[in-house]
Image: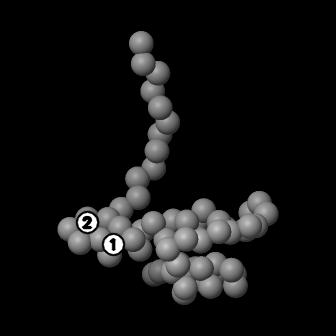
Amino acid sequence: MHKKVYFNNPQRLTQLIGANTTVIVAGRRTGKTDSIAAPFALRNMQRMPGSTGGIRRHRGISPQN
């Protein structure tokens, strides 16, 4: 069973338009990362010729001695 995903109007418009440059001026907890930046990056990776596409979680930078 798939989980339903809901988007607010700015999120929907950003995904629909798909501009090369997008500037979002929004407050905290408006879904900028999860619903605007991540789908944009994923879409670009999937459309790139020869790309396997994917997003990997960054675990931080390990200290170097």
Q: Residue at x 61, y 84 (%)?
A: 12
Q: Quadrant of residue 42?
A: bottom left
- In the rendered structure, the answer to whether residue 49 lies left or right of residue 1 reads left
- In the rendered structure, the answer to whether residue 22 lies left or right of residue 49 reads right
Q: Quadrant of residue 6?
A: bottom right
Residue 13: x and y in percent read 62, 85
Kind of residue sitting beneath label 1? Gln
User: Quarter of the image containing the N terminus?
Assistant: bottom left
Residue at the limit of the structure toward the top, as seen here: 65
Q: Is disc 2 in contact with disc 1, using a CB cutoff of under 8 Å?
A: yes
Can residue 65 be seen at all in this image of the molecule?
Answer: yes
Give the SS element for disc 2: loop
The residue singled out by tag 2 in the image is 51
Q: Residues within 10 Å of mark 1 (few under 14, many from 20)?
A: few
Q: Residue at x 55, y 85 (%)?
A: 17
Kind of residue sitting beneath label 2? Ser
Count how many numbered circles sit on residues in the image: 2
Residue 60: x and y in percent read 49, 36
Give the SS element for disc 1: helix
Residue 15: x and y in percent read 55, 81
Q: Residue at x 55, y 66 (%)?
A: 37
Which residue is nearer to you in this view: 51 or 22?
22
Q: Is residue 39 above or below residue 8?
A: above
The residue singled out by tag 1 in the image is 46
Residue at the limit of the structure toward the right, as seen here: 27
Of the numbered discs 2 and 1, the one sitting upstream in the chain is: 1
